[in-house]
Amino acid sequence: MNILLVRVSSLGDVLHNLPIVADIRRHFPDANIDWVVEEGYVSLVRLNQEVRNIIPFALRRWRKQLGDKAVRAEIGQFFRTLRQVEYDYVFDTQGLLKTGIIMGAARIVRGGQKVGLANGSEGSGYEGISRIFHSKSIPLDPRTHAVARGRLVVAAALGYQVDTPADFGLPEVSPHDPKPAWMPAEPYAVYFHGTARDAKKWAPAHWIELGRALAPLPILLPWGSPKEQAEAEALAAGLPNARVLPRLSMADAVLLARHAALAVGVDTGLTHIAAAFSRPVVEIYCDSPRWKTEGNWSPRIINLGDKGAPPSAAEVIAAAKRLLPSQ
């Protein structure tokens, strides 16, 4: 059986789609699973060795240069690659027009199905027009967890029950993993403090209070934009045990999360990556609903706060110390 998953972005959403792979392989061990994903997230999907082929999608880059002949040729090659295989099932678990178009262009065998979401979740960017590309649309409770949504859609189409904890198929930490120059030899904590929406951020004073409570544990501060870099530098100025990292590639950011002795982060993709690796993680919710993305598959994940109710520094410090008994 050949199966295509279409989940192109964003970082957290691609991550939350990964348990579908383990579910399928558990019930159909011989299935071939391919995936269409934005080119920036290919390295994340590649960590799951049960995915056969990854088809990079580069709309974020293409739309800036649609008049360029080379870009148009690249788009054409994408669709030719997409159509090389006939699939028994194509699953669009994102529910957008762009992912629906990808689904529509994919080839299926006689009797094959193109399956997607019949509705969005609360606050999602679901686009109902995507249903025109479906042969089957699966309705879900609008308050279904982000990880469960895709799992339930695929399970309904393939005829099995979702009855196991989420398995992201990510590799265990190994002593043979590469150790970049920026990674300390000793255990470290990482602050995933940056996010695109200011309302989702936690107060800088709280981050500094937490860091002082964790001293002398080194604290690493990644960033993804000049604004986040300035915010990281401001935090480091108040914390002698903190260090601002160089700009990291996606692969290095995953490595950072994978090796952390403790990750503390707001509701953002890198925090969820640390949780997917079942590292000790404190997830902080300030202006997004906790039910939607909270890590609920491991006792090493503590979720605090909720939409409009950010946790106090004392709550986060207590949670961090429960995850790090030596502290």
Image: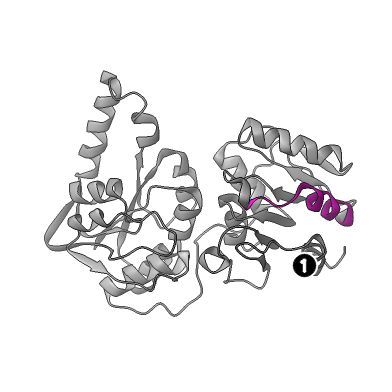
Quarter occupied by residue 229? top right
Examine the structure image and report whether residue 210 is included in the region drawn in magenta: yes
Within 10 angstroms of label 1, few (less than 14), some, or many (20 or more) residues? many
Label 1, on which residue? 319
Task: State the count of labels.
Answer: 1
Residue 26 in which image quadrant: bottom left
Specify how the rendered protein is coloured.
one colour
**In the picture, which quadrant includes the N terminus?**
bottom left
Judged by its main secondary structure, the magenta piece is helix
Q: Position of residue 228 (x, y in %)?
A: 66, 37
Residue drawn 31% across the image and 51% down it: 96
Q: Which residues are magenta?
A: 200-213
Q: Is residue 132 left or right of residue 147?
A: left
Q: Is residue 51 above or below residue 198?
A: below
Q: Is residue 217 left or right of residue 130?
A: right
Q: Is any atom of residue 176 visible in this view?
A: no
Furthest residue in direction front, as rendered: 308
In the image, residue 290 lies at what x, y percent?
58, 66
Q: Position of residue 273 (x, y in %)?
A: 58, 55
**Within the magenta stretch, is there residue 155?**
no
Quarter placement of the C terminus: bottom right
